[in-house]
Structure formats: C-alpha cells, structure tokens
Image (cartoon, rainbow, N blue to C red):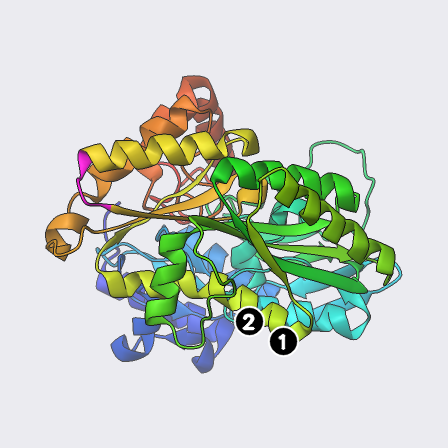
C-alpha cells in the first residue's frame, strides 16, 4: 500500500478534526508515543495521527473518511496486547483509532443479568458496576485495571475464570460494530435465545479489529457468589494436579471457578524478586496449584465437601500439603503469588514466552515433553510453566540459562518457539490460547489452519473488509 501524499493526508486529518474536535486528534509525536508501543517493548510503530472519537457516530464518520481516502486504521483499546495486535507498523501509513473516550456504561439490567457498555470502559469499571447491583462480571485477568472491553472482546480474552464462565466470547450477548465502510451494525440484543440466522457477533469477537471496530457490547452478568474458598495446594506433579481438579469439580458440583498451576521455580522467582510474596507452605514441593471455588449461598456443607475432597486427595497421594485462606485478605495474599510470577520473570534475564493450550487431559504430557524438547535444544534453559490448567491453557515461559547472553538468547525466540509448537501440534493443541495472533504469530496461520480453513478466514476478511484497511497485517499474513 503506497503512502498518501502529504497534502491529501492533511486534508483527511482536517476532515477528521472537524468530526472529533481538537481534543480528539493527536498529531504531536510525544503525545502519540504511548499509543505506538506495546508495554513489553517488543513492537513499536509509527502513525500520522491518533484519533480518539467520543461516540459511535464519530467512529463511523472517521472510518468512512479513511475508507474514502484509502488510509488503513489500527483500532486500539487499553493497548495491553501481548502479540502486537494494537500497534501500527513502522512505515507510519496507518492511523491509530483509540476507543478510550468511549467509556460510558449505557445500561445495567439487573433482572435480565446484562450490562451494556461502550468499548472504552475499563474491565475493573465493569466488575465494580456489576457488584454495585449485586451481580458478577466474571472476566478477570492481570491487566484488568487498564484493559478495555472493546479490546478484550476483539481478542476474546481469557483469564483465570474461564474454567467456570468461559472466554469473553461466552460473556457477550450482543455487539455494536462499525464496519469497514463506516456503516454501523447495531446488534445490541439482550436475548439469550435468538434463532434468526447467522450469529454475526461471533465474527467480530476474537477478530482483533480486522473485520470491524467494536464500539459497544451487551455483557452477561451472573449472581454474585456468597461463599468463596481459596486453597493453595502442593502437588507432586502436573498429572496429580489434573486428577485433583477432576475430584474438586465432582465434589463441589462443578463450582471450581479457577485452578492455576505453577512450578516451584515460578514460586522461587516470585519470592526472590517481588516484595510481599510469601511461601505459604512449610515444605518444598515441585508443583503447586491455587484454586478458588464459589457457591451462591453460604453453607458449612460446602466448606466441608471441599475439605473432604482435599483430605481424600492426600490419601490418594495427589496432594502433599495445603492451606485454605481464612479471610479475604489471606485469599488475596495467595493470589498475589500467581500475579507476581509474571513480574518476577523479567529479573531473570530474557524470557521466551508461549501462550498455548492442549486438552486438559494432556497438560501433564505437554509439560513433560516440552520441557525435554527445549532442554535438548538449549541446555540450561529454565522452563517456568504456569497458568490456567483448568482450561488447558499453559503459559510455557522459558527463562534464559544462567549467565547466558540475553540478546543472543532472545535471538533464538522463533527457533525455541518452533520446538514448543511441534509438541503442541502433536497433542492437538493451539499455539495461541488467549493472547491472540496479532503481528507475532500471523505468519504461522496458513500452516496451522490448513488450506480449507485458512481459505474460509480469507473469504470472511475479503467480504467484510475488501480494501484491507482494518488492522492490516494482523492475524492473517
């Protein structure tokens, strides 16, 4: 795609400024900088302008102007992407369209258990608004203080509660979307049942802004739990963790909301580098899980059933030690361990990161085979597997060998990831469980999807964005 001449570009920017006002258009380089780089520093791009519309009508007008001029657009939410999906390319041909000013909660229908929000509403705002009407919005992840709903929907975000409540796709009833030509599709329906044709909303959920720009959504709410049990359990192996999960699901009536696995190395990194982290158990174990179970009513019987299940796990040698939080503050302290793992890794040098998934029943096999494969490829490498094992999603991160050159190690990123991916393919898994494809994994899409499926993806893209102006170069090569 050729660059637009300077005079024509200025005319386009003037037209956009007339739509969004002077506060809605950023062209100063220093002011644009936060919108042009992702937080890990892996991707940094350029852009002639950052546009910040205040409502759907302004988004539609901006998209129509850009479509007419042939200028590509990169939609952006909270810019918490881990695969470069919200960052423009270095050539500087794309305009960044930030949805951050569209931050209204339009409606809460407590009896229908729905909330209608604009794309720029931050996830914690949604969680708090649901709590104020005694409801729960269960999506929860590390970036929830900055991640915006439009981006979460466009990437089909996961998080710690997928086991019980599903991915973001499962939490959305309706969408409002600005299409590539500037038309607006109003699909903000609050219905659980609507059997009238194709489910269009699912085209845009997880599409990473390549098919349309999500401007609002109807979200599902749930009853607020009245009882929560958080336990930190030492287990001898990932296989034991999977068996423990099955037992807890059965004993609780499938009330397990979260079930997270971590290796001892993960915990040691957190203890070493993140202040406030504790080692909650007296004896060292090679593996741990942190799990949360919730119930709609407070009951001693619920607590007793979980304690009984844990006791039986001890007898079956599936667990060797455990602690159950006795207060909300203790539960938060246990969950802080899980959160600290992400931050702690950066202090151990270069970290090659893999966000992968396999069937839950094959998690243990994946970890064993992948650890052996990367050790053979890079002696001394330090795997730090952790994550949402309850839904089969493992963050198989790999810290550099001690004393290794960081730049030389990170230069092997693609090579090492290929080793991991070969194990994933052998186990019928996915190389992207919840982070998406973005710029980072797009070139692998033809191989992992196969010709028929990839052709279908291309056909959908061509039908909805024939000029290829919406987030070009993302998801599909």
- 381 in relation to 341, above or below: above
The image position of residue 8, as x and y in percent, is 29, 62
Over which residues does the magenta segment extend? 377-381
**Between residues 271 and 194, which one lies in front from this camera angle?**
271
Whether residues under marks 1 and 2 lie with C-beta atoms below 8 angstroms apart, the answer is: yes
Residue at position x 31%, y 65% from top? 36
Does the magenta segment cover residue 366? no
The image position of residue 369, as x and y in percent, is 35, 30
Q: Which residue is mark 2?
A: 333
Figure quadrant of residue 118: bottom right
Figure quadrant of residue 169: top right
**Between residues 183 and 326, which one lies in front from this camera angle?**
326
Q: Which mark is residue 429?
A: none
Provide the major secondary structure of the magenta segment: loop
The image position of residue 413, as x and y in percent, is 22, 44
Q: Which residue is mark 1?
A: 329
- 27 in relation to 466, above or below: below
């Amino acid at each position: 795609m050729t660059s637009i001449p300077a005079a024509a570009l200025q005319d386009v920017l003037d037209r956009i400024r007339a739509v969004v006002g002077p506060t809605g258009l950023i062209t100063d380089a220093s002011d644009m900088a936060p919108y042009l780089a992702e937080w890990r520093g892996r991707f940094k791009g350029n852009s002639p302008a950052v546009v910040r519309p205040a409502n759907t009508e302004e988004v539609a007008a901006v998209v129509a102007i850009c479509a007419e001029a042939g200028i590509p657009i990169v939609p952006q939410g909270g810019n918490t992407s881990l695969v470069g999906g919200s960052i423009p390319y270095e050539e500087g041909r794309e305009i960044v369209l930030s949805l951050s000013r569209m931050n209204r909660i339009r409606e809460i229908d407590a009896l229908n258990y729905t909330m209608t929000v604009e794309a720029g509403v931050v996830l914690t705002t949604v969680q708090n608004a649901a709590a104020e009407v005694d409801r729960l919005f269960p999506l929860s992840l590390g970036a929830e203080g900055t991640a915006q709903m439009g981006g979460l929907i466009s990437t089909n975000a996961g998080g710690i509660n997928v086991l019980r409540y599903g991915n973001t796709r499962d939490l959305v009833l309706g969408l409002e979307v600005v299409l590539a030509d500037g038309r607006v599709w109003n699909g903000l329906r609050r219905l659980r049942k609507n059997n009238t044709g194709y489910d269009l909303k699912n085209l845009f959920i997880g599409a990473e802004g390549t098919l349309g720009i999500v401007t609002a959504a109807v979200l599902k709410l749930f009853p607020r739990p009245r009882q929560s049990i958080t336990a930190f359990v030492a287990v001898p192996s990932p296989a034991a963790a999977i068996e423990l999960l099955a037992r807890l699901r059965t004993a609780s009536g499938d009330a397990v909301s979260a079930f997270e696995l971590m290796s001892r190395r993960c915990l040691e990194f957190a203890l070493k580098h993140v202040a406030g982290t504790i080692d909650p158990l007296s004896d060292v174990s090679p593996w741990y899980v942190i799990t949360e179970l919730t119930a709609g009513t407070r009951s001693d019987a619920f607590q007793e059933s979980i304690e009984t299940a844990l006791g039986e796990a001890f007898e079956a040698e599936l667990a060797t030690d455990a602690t159950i939080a006795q207060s909300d503050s203790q539960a938060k302290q246990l969950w802080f361990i899980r959160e600290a793992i992400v931050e702690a890794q950066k202090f151990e040098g270069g970290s090659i990161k893999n966000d992968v998934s396999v069937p839950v029943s094959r998690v243990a096999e994946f970890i064993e085979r992948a650890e052996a494969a990367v050790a053979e490829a890079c002696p001394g490498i330090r795997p730090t597997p952790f994550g949402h094992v309850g839904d089969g999603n493992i963050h198989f991160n790999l810290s550099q060998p001690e004393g290794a050159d960081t730049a030389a190690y990170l230069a092997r990123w693609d090579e090492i990831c290929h080793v991991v991916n070969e194990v994933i393919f052998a186990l019928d898994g996915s190389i992207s469980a919840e982070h998406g494809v973005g710029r980072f994994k797009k070139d692998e899409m033809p191989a992992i999807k196969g010709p028929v499926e990839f052709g279908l993806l291309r056909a959908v893209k061509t039908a909805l964005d024939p000029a290829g102006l919406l987030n070009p170069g993302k998801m599909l090569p």
